[in-house]
Image: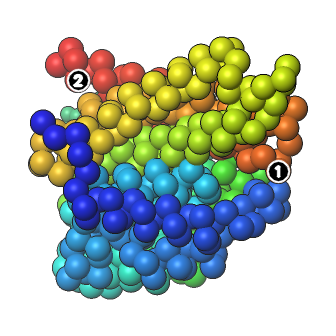
Amino acid sequence: MHFELTEEHIAVRDAARDFAQAELLPGVIERDTEAKFPFEQIKKMGELGFMGMMVDPKYNGGGMDTISYVLAMEEISKIDASASVSMSVNNSLVCWGLEKYGTESQKEKYLKRLAAGEIIGAFCLSEPEAGSDATSQKTTAELRGDHYILNGTKNWITNGSSASVYLVIAQTDISKGHKGISAFIVEKGWDGFLIGKKEDKLGIRGSDTHSLMFTDVKVPVENRIGEEGFGFTFAMETLNGGRIGIAAQALGIASGAYELAVAYSKERKAFGKPISQHQAIQFKLADMATQIEAARLLVLKSAWLKDQGQDYAYASAMAKLYASEVAMNVTIEAVQVHGGYGYVKEYHVERLMRDAKITQIYEGTSEIQKIVISRSLLR
Ligand code: CAA
């Protein structure tokens, strides 16, 4: 068992760290306040290879392993979780799903541009009445010759207005339940496809989250991913990997807040000495560091299992469940360490605390992760 990163892993982590400091930190508070999507920054992330890290180089990807991806996700998330959720959705939901299950022509047409970061993608499963209960899809796709007619509404879609390509899950045969669900590639701008209102959110405010409306949208049969009826398995398998990305995001939010708390505690004096010399603060830092280290091990283990070609659904659910709890705990404590300064935007930790909450909700709530874990335990 090796607990050391390779030189390549360290280089990727350092490149992500440098990028986050140089390009994401400036303006992150303003983007949060104004709910402004980091367009320019995401474009640069694409140019540096962060948007298609694990994709085969023949499709313009970085050909890297999942360990490299989670290391980069952690560094980007320390600074800007709005940028990192776009990165996570593009890498582990959209690119992974297309590379694993897309046809060669779908890969040529869509994956190459997504992996190069020329365009970004969105993953559309959730609906107004189908969040955790993902089998209750109301969106329908009806086969009419060489195309499907897509109707329905999707909710809370990350990259909702900034994406160019949308992977949409829909019912093709309602009588078959989840075995009658299929997945499709839909392009922005197609007739009948409307981007709905932007959500005004507690956290990850720079991320553009929208509802999407499909009214009689014509989707060519060649844009179906896999066979008819494969869509639910497609969504579940894609989310198994997506949860590794979100776990790494949660880890980054926690470690970003922790690093700020350590630095602040060494500078801030109270009762004649830096607060880092008071045991009340030392114990908080010790708890934060221990939780972060445990979360990091779970995240790396799930990434490693995926790289080894082993079953990782259970490990990724555990990593996400635990890392998101740690993100919440650690960011709350980081605000506490900062006292009154922690409650104002300038010190970053209040934003990280708001950003942490979503990691317990999206890509499967903590309760859903417990279902995935316990079903796997009891199988
Ligand atoms: N991996 C692979 N297959 C899975 C799976 C998994 N993790 N979980 C379920 N399945 C398969 C089952 O094996 C079953 O297949 P068969 O019928 O062929 O055996 C099928 O899916 C149905 O499973 P269940 O009978 O267990 O269905 P269920 O309705 O009882 O529960 C669930 C399924 C696990 C709760 C599922 O609905 C779920 O994961 N819900 C959460 C959805 C979610 O994560 N949404 C996130 C939205 S995307 C997002 O947030 C992206 C973003 O923008 C950031």
User: Label 1 neighbourhood size at 10 Å, few (<14), some (14-19), many (20+)?
Assistant: few
From the image, state whether disc 2 or disc 1 is nearer to you: 1
Q: Quadrant of ligand 1?
A: top left
Quadrant location of the C terminus in the rendered image: top left
Q: Nearer the viewer, residue 21 or 165?
A: 21
User: Which residue: 54% across, 79% down?
Assistant: 43
**Amino acid carrying mark 1 in the image:** Glu
On the image, the x and y values in percent for residue 8 come to 26, 64
For the residue labelled by badge 1, is the local secondary structure a helix, a strand or a loop?
helix
On the image, the x and y values in percent for residue 125 come to 46, 50
Of labels 2 and 1, earlier in sequence is 1
In which image quadrant can residue 22 be found? Answer: bottom right
Q: Which residue is mark 1?
A: 346
Q: Nearer the viewer, residue 367 or 252?
A: 252
Q: Which residue is mark 2?
A: 376
**CB at disc 2 and ligand 1 closer than 8 Å:** no
**Amino acid carrying mark 2 in the image:** Ser
